[in-house]
Amino acid sequence: MDSILLLNKKLKEFNEEEWSKLFEKAVKMKLPKGSTVFSAAESSQGVFIIESGWVKISRISNEGRESVVGCIRNPKEIIGLAEVLLDKKRTCNAVAITNIEIGFLRREDFYNLIKEDFNISLKVMRLLAERMREAEENVHNLSSKYVSKRLASFLYKASFKWGVDDFDGIKIPLNLTHEEIAQVVGTSRQTTTKALNMLQQRGIIKLEKKQIKILDIKKLISSYK
């Protein structure tokens, strides 16, 4: 995995005091699964801060096919940053894949905050740098790796970012459908299902309803290298 993704969390994650500052002027909302947080082509009036739940960032092609271009964003992440900083319209859709609690921070309030607090400003820059490197890696994977390797890479990063230790492995606590995983790795649902079943047959993962458990992390790593 790219070293930027293993960056010391203290360098890029906001502490409790910083989160309090971010949420201080934010408008808080509770949205059900499937809700649209923002849509492509709409004006960017501010940033969104995920307090709980998970959001996918995606685009729709001219043929109507959806692809997850920003991976899955988790609690304590800010979304909609780039368009606000560039003063451009949204280029992607953000949709809740679980029930979410989210805060909306107006552009002016966000600008004032990053002007006033150097640590928050620095962590925003590091967050954007991480996402840029992540996007570069995704483009490279799409152009040079087989589906099975892209899937293994996604599962490893998901286990690193969101995994929960279980008695026989690492559980990824996201109820993702095979279609949603396919959108992330850039292939069809059928191909994704086949690749997941192959990993399960090799004893690398275990499919439990909509959740995935990593049984052998070393074999998973060797699967995408």
Image (cartoon, helix red, strand yellow):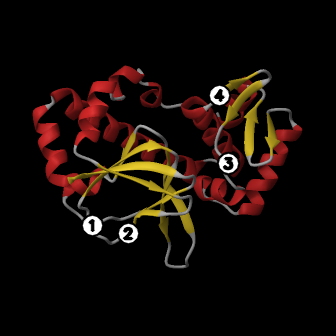
| Label of residue 164 in the image | 4
Name the amino acid, label 4. Val
Name the amino acid, label 1. Lys
Viewer-side label of 3, 2: 3
Please give the name of the residue rendered at 22% of the width and 45% of the height, measured from the top-left corner: 25
Please give the name of the residue rendered at 68% of the width and 40% of the height, measured from the top-left corner: 152
Query: Dividing the image into 4 quarters, which one contains the N terminus?
Result: top right
Question: Could you tell whether 131 is left or right of 153 in the image?
Answer: left
Q: Residue furthest bottom?
A: 63
| Label of residue 120 in the image | none
Residues at marks 2 and 1 touching, judged by CB atoms closer than 8 Å: yes
Give the spatial CA distance, label 4 vs label 1: 36 Å
The x, y position of residue 186, in whole percent, is 60, 58
Give the spatial CA distance, label 4 vs label 2: 33 Å
Numbered disc 2: secondary structure: loop
The answer to which of 184 and 207 lies nearer the viewer is 207
Viewer-side label of 4, 1: 4
| Label of residue 89 in the image | 1
